[in-house]
Image (cartoon, helix red, strand yellow):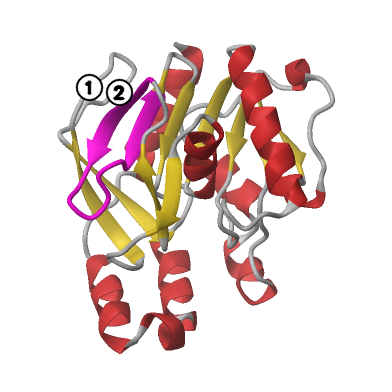
């Protein structure tokens, strides 16, 4: 299976030598489950998108430092691609920014969250279990880094995982769209580096809370299984 990665950002130069770029992170994550997966990279934030929807078996939209409401032309072009892919019943995985953009493209609403930044390990309860969610578990712990959230669901969205902080954390729309606010591709070391780098923005108290949360286990390997199972279901 070839997955088209719709890249919406780059890892900063001061982090990339140690942690790699986002396609590297996703390859490391998903190859744990299926080493036969291949990837095609599209620089979506530079206007590069597939000309033929069948160039890849499925697509994955990454996170971004930008917000889905920022109004850049490339974001509008990507929204239009989401609509085309969805109407063709192509499978799409949405991660953080990708989660939000899919919701927005399909009629949902994304806003700056009144409860502020989500950083470190986010603990969410699984609210609905699907056959592809193997191994099954009752909670999902993933690393997060976001200020905005989906606040109104698009038509037909099912909530699969939720918390008081982020009620619409993980969504499925029909049989072809799976989205999550978390970052399964992040390592704890990369999350720590981001938090420490943004202390002046986050504030001392929130930064320390985020760093302390890194003591919790993360379910990146479980979620990698869920992604692959969903794409093959």
- The number of callouts visible is 2
User: Residue 67: x and y, percent?
Assistant: 56, 57
Quarter holding residue 125: top left
Picture residue at 21% right of the left edge, 24% below the top = 128
Q: Which residue is mark 1?
A: 129
- Looking at the image, which residue is at 27% across and 65% down? 115
Task: Write the start and end of the magenta stretch as one range.
Answer: 156-172
Q: Is residue 30 visible?
A: no
**Disc 2 crowd, CA 10 A, few/some/many (<14, 14-19, 20+):** some
Label 1: few (<14), some or many (≥20) within 10 Å?
Answer: some
Residue located 66% across and 50% down the image = 8
- The answer to whether residue 50 is left or right of residue 176 is right
Vertically, is 111 above or below 233?
below
Q: Position of residue 178 (x, y in %)?
A: 44, 28
Residue 96 position, x and y percent, is: 47, 48
The answer to if 164 sits in the magenta stretch is yes
Q: Which residue is mark 2?
A: 133
Closer to the camera in the image, 188 or 50: 50
Which label was assigned to residue 162? none
Residue 143 falls inside the magenta stretch: no
């Amino acid at each position: 299976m070839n997955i088209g990665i719709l890249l919406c950002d780059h890892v900063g130069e001061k982090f990339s030598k140690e942690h790699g770029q986002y396609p590297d992170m996703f390859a490391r994550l998903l190859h744990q489950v299926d080493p036969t997966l291949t990837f095609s990279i599209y620089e979506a934030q530079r206007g590069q998108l597939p000309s033929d929807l069948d160039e890849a078996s499925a697509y994955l939209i990454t996170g971004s430092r930008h917000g889905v409401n920022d109004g850049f032309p490339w974001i509008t072009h990507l929204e239009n691609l989401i609509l085309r892919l969805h109407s063709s019943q192509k499978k799409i995985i949405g991660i953080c920014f990708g989660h939000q953009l899919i919701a927005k493209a399909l009629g949902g609403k994304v806003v700056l969250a009144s409860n502020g930044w989500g950083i470190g390990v986010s603990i969410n309860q699984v609210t609905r279990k699907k056959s592809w969610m193997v191994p099954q578990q009752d909670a999902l712990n993933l690393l997060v880094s976001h200020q905005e959230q989906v606040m109104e669901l698009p038509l037909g969205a099912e909530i699969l995982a939720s918390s008081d902080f982020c009620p619409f954390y993980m969504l499925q729309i029909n049989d072809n769209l799976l989205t999550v606010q978390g970052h399964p591709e992040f390592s704890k070391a990369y999350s720590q580096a981001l938090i420490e780098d943004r202390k002046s923005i986050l504030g001392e108290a929130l930064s320390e809370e985020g760093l302390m949360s890194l003591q919790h286990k993360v379910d990146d390997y479980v979620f990698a299984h869920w992604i692959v199972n969903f794409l093959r279901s």
